[in-house]
Amino acid sequence: MPLEDSPSLEEYRQGIPPLPEEIGSMEKPPRRTGRLGWWLAIAALGVVALALAVWNVLRTGNVPNSEAGFGEVVGRVVDAAGNPVRAEILVDVGDMRVQAEPDGRFRLTNVPAGRRALLIGYMYMAREYFVTVRANTTVDVGQITMPSSVREGGYGRLEWR
Amino acid sequence: MGRQRNGHCSTGQGVIEYALILALLAAVAVLGLSAMGVSLQNVFGEVISALSVLGGQQPPSCEVFYQSQFDRGINEWYQLKGGLWSGKWRNIAGKMVGDPLAAALLKSVNQADYVVTAESISLEKVRDTYRGFALIFRAAALGDQLESYMFEFEKKNAADPGLMYFSKWVRGYQVFPPLAQAGVPANFDWDKVQQMRVVVQGDTFIAYINGQEVLRAHDSTYAQGYVGMAVNYGSRATVSNFSVTSIGCP
């Protein structure tokens, strides 16, 4: 730059002037709309993720399986004709099991609260049911129907198909 | 994007927005696949398996846990006795012969993942009902009460075309409906099966009959256990070869 084109000291009396591009930017209002769009997209994705998470929990039943306290499970096991079945009822914790009464009714006490798998077993065959046990409450699983036909040959197993 | 001299971003997107978008996209993708019933663990497992096949790689350790040592007698097998299991396995001329309702577990293999193979299985018809044979895996035996998985083929009676299924045993009870089921392959020979194999890896079980994949199931109740064999009510089985190897052995 020729010496005659150099700024004079007079121009720096108020300090260093801003660069031309910064003058432009200082005059423009802040661009909020672009950023707002991103946050809206984030919020939308968050809502979708939350909805999918809720759907997965509802679909698979993956709720926490350990809660404090103990509850009870009651029910009745019958065969296809409605006759009581003295099935064995097992729970997926420890060695908890009980045999149904002659009228098919059963009561499991001191079942740890949470989502539990009940196994209704009879003649070497079982069906699995899932129940949610709440502390200090009784869950009634109602009437459970087991297959009633014994396998051909009578070797003591239930028929399932 | 405008930028002030001090370097702070005043407009446009910052690192936080980009990170949030990426994280949420990943979460939506994972949750979406899960909602459709796709297991990412299985997908990744299959991808790794496919890549290792493409790359001609074998897993570093191909281990044979057991290989047809029937000539050592029956002592290395634990026989389930009582309850349903009224039959018995015997060793005859270097082959395992199982009576109806016989079940036995190999004492020496208690692992998580493995490949179980039974070969040259001859099935003698003892009764018209419930003919069949089963491979047991990830098993524990509480006296006569089996806790395990089982892959079996079963023919209910003469009119039944037959069924194959994976099932779970819990404290001596076989849980129904099974984990997975399918009809037997076309031209299935109920008197002789050349090879029956189950690949047990993670929560995935794949069954093969004569080298052909026939059924697949998923479950995570039992993480490891013994292997074994069982015979159904209407059959007597003779098995010439039985092996247990690690995953990926040729």
Image: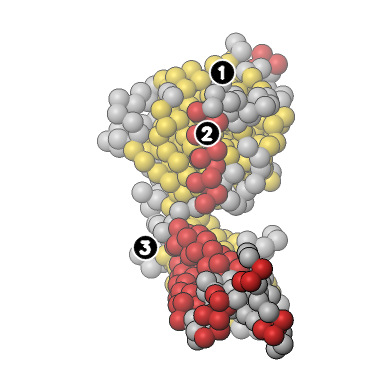
Vertical side of B11 occupied by B174: above or below = above
The answer for which chain carries disc 1 is B
For disc 3, the neighbor class at 10 Å (few under 14, some 14 to 19, many from 20) is few
Q: Are marks 2 and 1 on the same chain?
A: yes
Secondary element at image label 2: helix
In depth, the one of B14 and B87 nearer the eye is: B14
Res B229 quadrant in image: top right
Asked if one can make out residue A6 in the rendered structure from this viewpoint, the answer is: yes
Vertical side of A17 occupied by B21: above or below = above
Residue tagged 1: B241
Q: Residue furthest left?
A: B159
Res A111 quadrant in image: bottom right
Residue tagged 3: A80
The quadrant the C terminus of chain B occupies is top right
For disc 1, the neighbor class at 10 Å (few under 14, some 14 to 19, many from 20) is some
Residue B236 placed where, x, y %? 48, 25
Tell me the kind of residue under disc 2: Leu
Residue A151 placed where, x, y %? 40, 45
Give the number of the mark in front: 2 or 3.
Answer: 2
The answer for which chain carries disc 3 is A
Residue tagged 2: B51
Tell me the kind of residue under disc 3: Ala
Residue B242 placed where, x, y %? 58, 22
Give the number of the mark in front: 3 or 1.
Answer: 1
Whether residue A129 sits left or right of residue A159 in the image: it is right
